[in-house]
Amino acid sequence: MFVAKVIGNMVCTHKNDNLKGLKLLIVQPVDDGLKEKGKPLVAIDTIGQSGEGDLVYLAKSRESSLPLNKDLVPSDAGILGIIDYYNVTKRMEEK
């Protein structure tokens, strides 16, 4: 799983039948400090409640579509939840 920020949405007039009725959002992966990391990507909103500006956690590959209970959903990422609180405590590295 990884953390990302929703930065936009995507509207498609033609898409795979298994994607019909699902909201597609553009997300920007972030690091532990919530700074941008990597390139934005399209994710399925499997919970149906995410929106622009939300901090979300996602799964990649096959796991991204498991909450949908459908076979062969073509996706690279799926939003599994909205993050309400986020705290990272850095550990001291041993020397």
Image (tube, rainbow, N blue to C red):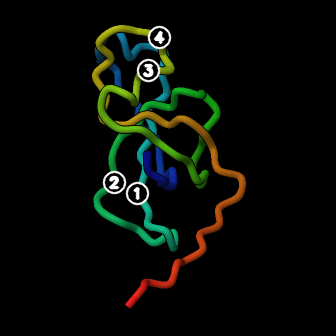
Write down the residue under mark 1: 29
Check residue 41 in the rendering and tell me which mark sits there, or answer none.
Answer: none
Q: Residue at x 71, y 52 (%)?
A: 84
Check residue 69 in the rendering and tell me which mark sits there, or answer none.
Answer: 4
Disc 3 residue type (three-letter): Leu
| CB under 8 Å between discs 2 and 1 | yes
Secondary structure category for the residue under label 4: loop
Which of 92/82 is in front?
92
| Residue 23 x/y as whole percent | 49, 28
| Residue 6 x/y as whole percent | 51, 50
| CB under 8 Å between discs 4 and 2 | no
Distance in Å between CA atoms under marks 1 and 4? 25 Å
Question: Which tag, 3 or 2, sits closer to the chain's start?
Answer: 2
Q: Which corner quadrant holds the C terminus?
A: bottom left
Write down the residue under mark 3: 66
Q: Is residue 61 above or below residue 32?
A: above
Write down the residue under mark 2: 40
Distance in Å between CA atoms under marks 2 and 1? 7 Å
Distance in Å between CA atoms under marks 3 and 1? 20 Å
Q: Few, some or many C-alpha atoms within 10 Å of disc 2 (few <14, some 14-19, many ≥20)?
A: some
